[in-house]
Amino acid sequence: MGLLSGKTALITGASKGIGRAIAIRYAQEGANVAFTYLSSVEKGQALENELAAFGIKAKGYKSDASNFAAADELVNAVVSEFGGLDILINNAGITRDNLLMRMTEDAWDEVINVNLKSCFNTVKAATRTMMKAKAGSIINITSVVGIKGNAGQANYAASKSGIVGFTKSVALELGSRNIRCNAVAPGFIETEMTAVLDEKTVQGWRDAIPMKRGGQPDEVANACVFLGSDMSSYISGQVLQVDGAMLT
C-alpha cells in the first residue's frame, strides 16, 4: 500500500521537470493522477501511459489553468472522470526574466497570470468538491525567489510571493472544513531547463549552496507526497523550503 493509495490528485503543468516528477511519485504511491499540459499532446499521452503502468488511473488534460473558465471546466471534468478530488497541486509556472526597467507589461501580466492567477482559478474550482468531502490537501509550488527576491525576476518573485500569501489565507479560510493548504518552495533544482545552461555558471550556484549540490526534481516530489498524504494531517499554512539550506 502506498502513502497515497485511493486518493485522486490533480497536478498542473506536469509534462516536464518538477511537475512530471511529482506525477510519477504520486503514481508510485498509489494515487490516481489527473494532470495538465499546455503544448505537446505526444508528451501528455506518453506521461499518461507511463503513469498508468503503475496500476493506477491516469489522464492528461490539455488545459490552461490561467484561464478562469478553463480551470473550472478542468476540475469539473476531473471530478466527473475520477469520482472526486483529494489533492490539488498547482505547479504550472513560467519565467519571463528581465530587469525591471526593460520589462514589458506583457512579460509582467503573463507571469502573474500563469503563476499566480492559476492558483486562484484551480483552488476556487476545487473548493466545492473538497468542502463537500470535508477533506483535501492543496499544495502550491512557490520558490525561494518568492521569499528572498531576485534581481531580474521582479515579475516571477512577485507571483511566487503572492502564492505564499494566498496559501496562508486559504489555510485560514478552509481549515474548519479539514482542507489543508501548504506551499513548497524549491531552491536550485536541476531540470531540463538548467541542463542547457553554462556548466561553470551552474557549478558556481552549486558551490554557493550549503549542501554543495543542486536539488533533484524527485526531492521536491517527495515533499509533495508528504504534504498530500495523511502523514501531514495537522500541517497547514506552511511553506516548506526544499533548497539544501540555500535560504536559511
Image (cartoon, grey):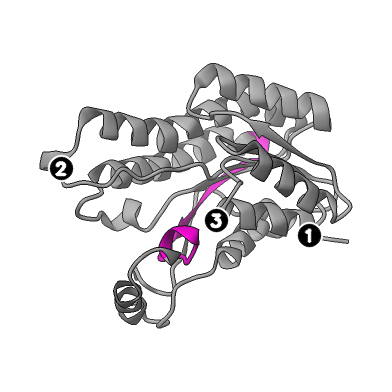
Does the stretch in magenta take in 182?
Answer: yes
Disc 3 marks which residue?
Answer: 17
Q: Quadrant of residue 117?
A: top left
Foreground disc of the pair 1, 3:
3
Q: Residue at x 41, y 63 (%)?
A: 196
- Label 2 element class: helix
- Label 1 element class: helix
* Mark 1 or 2, nearer chain start: 1
Disc 1 marks which residue?
Answer: 28
Res 234 visible = no
Question: Where the C terminus falls, by quadrant?
Answer: bottom left
Q: Amino acid at mark 3?
A: Gly
Q: Is residue 76 left or right of residue 220?
A: right
- Label 3 element class: helix
Disc 2 marks which residue?
Answer: 100
The residue closer to the viewer here, 215 or 143, is: 215
Foreground disc of the pair 3, 2:
3
Q: Magenta stretch? A: 177-194
Q: Estimate the spatial distance between the alpha carbons at disc 3 and disc 2, rounded to whole Å.
A: 27 Å
